[in-house]
Amino acid sequence: MKITAIPDYCLGCGLCRIYCAAAHDGFQGNVLRAFKHGSPLPRINLINWQGLTYFNVCRHCQDAPCINACISGAMQRDENGRVYVDNSRCVSCYTCILVCPFGHPQVSRERPGILKCDLCRESNREPACLKHCPNEAIIWDEESGPTGSAKNKVHGE
Amino acid sequence: MRYLIVGSGIAAVGAVEGIRRFDRRGEITVLDGEKRGAYTRPLISYYLSDPIHYADLSFRPDSFFRLNQVEMIKARGIKIDRRARILNLDNGMQLAYDRLLLACGASPAQLELSDLNQRWVSNFYTLEDVERLNMNIREGQQAVVIGSGLIGVKAAEALLKRGLRVTLVEKAQHILPQVLSPTAAARLGVYLEKAGIKIIAGDELAAVYPQHRIQLSSGTVLQSDQLIMAVGIRPNTELAFSAGLKVGKGIVADSYLRTSDEYIFAAGDVIETPNLITSNREIMALLPHAHREGYLAGANMSGQTLFYRGGVAMNSVKLQGWSLFAAGIPKPGASIFYWQEDDKYLEIHHHQNCLQKFIAINLPEVAGPLLSIIETQLPIPEKMWQEYVECYPTIANLPALYWQKIWKGEKNDSIEC
């Protein structure tokens, strides 16, 4: 289960990061509340590489090195296969950061623990980034998500 | 199938997970010789720093063994009868097995000194060690930590946090000798001294006297209300050795984690782990490796043939707010590139077209990609590293060859984890 972005469609506008931040930390999707009155902490990153925008999101690897390496058992997989961090158990040793070949888990200066994509498991809705991408660049990866045919649909348009 | 696991640490938990992925019905028995359940040793320094906040050191939820139908026996294995496939326990019990896993871990190495057996001298390895320290330490006491490996520096940090005056003694010329270079250690040393940890490098413990006094090789005499010994570890190989299994520095296991007996496997700190870069077998007592080896051993005991490539030395540690990442091993003749700005620091060792080692201080975003470049021995020309440290070392500026590999992986989803 994972999402990905089609580089040809991604403009690097960063709306995904805005909606990501608003979808977490109890902001319940309220962008204004998150950005005007809170400290928004997006879980995903856009990396500009040679004119392409690389969508740095968790792959929710089947054999996840971060779960394997976590020293406190904070990094876990839920019953739907989503890899998430239980920050109440995290001791900020950052071993997950060291073992992720994609450089996905982030630290935040605002608070201890780790920030990583959890596919919006708390809201139990479609990931906010995917839902709000204006260009439909963010899609469920083929065969892995509940709407596995999304990629074909987008390509077919 | 009857699985018997000696040890209840990280490798044992990994093994239970590995077995249960492929075998839901086999009987699993785990021997917990320490009688404290499956806890994470690296968390003991956190416990000492704040026993209330870090009261829970368990590696998996309490229900883990019950849900996986594991029987826990609080005893140690003392003798293996390989012919009858029976393990004798220290409580007089005998257990028959079809597959035995030796995940017996390691113990703190001991200096050959007399008078170490004092109430104010402690190891820093088990939960019991830190529980006793927690009772004995008092604010304002002098603590001396012998050894500045990861255990030593984390012990020093915890004691400092509890209000003790801490001196860290390292035999090598600089702190964290296995992890850091002299340059990186010097930067960290200045920072730790500022935070209040006194560092004495290039000196070692020579004598322990009554009345809380110790003497170092240089002749320096220190007052020491608490003396913490953190001079390394040695694998618990006695059980394997007495059973006639092949043992070097640790238990020798093949690429499927099988020992020289086809029914006996071994995993974790007790085995020699193949170094991915040099192919040498060495003691690499690291938690991620222990879990990985345990998992693969468990899977292979249940009939799979999963190959273990080995690992590289790698460490991530947060110390007084600084994050240190290091992986790989230094190689003579390597070209070394440095970058630094404020409290950020990066060091890249390049040899024969491959990244051999890196040290990153307060630069978390590049740590994962750099480790994966080492592990996959991705060939990257020296010039690219030169350019990398000349510009700002961000994840986006990593050599194009890394990014090409990631983009390709993105298409085939073939990144090996």
Image (cartoon, rainbow, N blue to C red):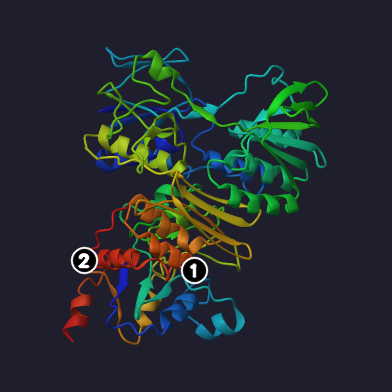
Q: Is residue A28 above or below residue B364?
A: below
Residue placed under numbered mark 1 in the picture: B390
Circle 2 or circle 1, nearest the eye: 1
How many numbered marks are there?
2
The residue depicted at 22 percent of the width and 64 percent of the height is B412
Q: Is residue B362 above or below residue B89?
A: below
Task: Name the amino acid, label 2.
Answer: Glu
Which chain is indicated by disc 2? A
Query: How many angstroms separate mark 2 from mark 1 (CA)?
Result: 42 Å
Q: Identify the image quadrant of residue B379.
A: bottom left
* Frontmost residue, A131 versus A96: A96
Looking at the rendering, in which quadrant would you find the C terminus of chain A?
Answer: bottom left
Circle 1 SS class: helix
The residue depicted at 39 percent of the width and 63 percent of the height is B383
Looking at the rendering, in which quadrant would you find the N terminus of chain A?
Answer: bottom left
As drawn, is B216 to the left or to the right of A112? right
Query: Can residue B185 be seen by looking at this rendering?
Result: yes
Specify whether disc 2 shares its chain with disc 1.
Answer: no
Which chain is indicated by disc 1? B
* Frontmost residue, B286 versus B148: B148
Residue B32, position as x, y percentages in the image:
47, 28
Residue A19, position as x, y percentages in the image:
45, 80
Residue B187, position as x, y percentages in the image:
64, 54
Task: Name the amino acid, label 1.
Answer: Glu
Most distant residue in the left direction: A156
Most distant residue in the front direction: B333
Residue B179, position as x, y percentages in the image:
53, 45
Residue placed under numbered mark 2 in the picture: A143
Query: Can residue A103 be seen by looking at this rendering?
Result: no
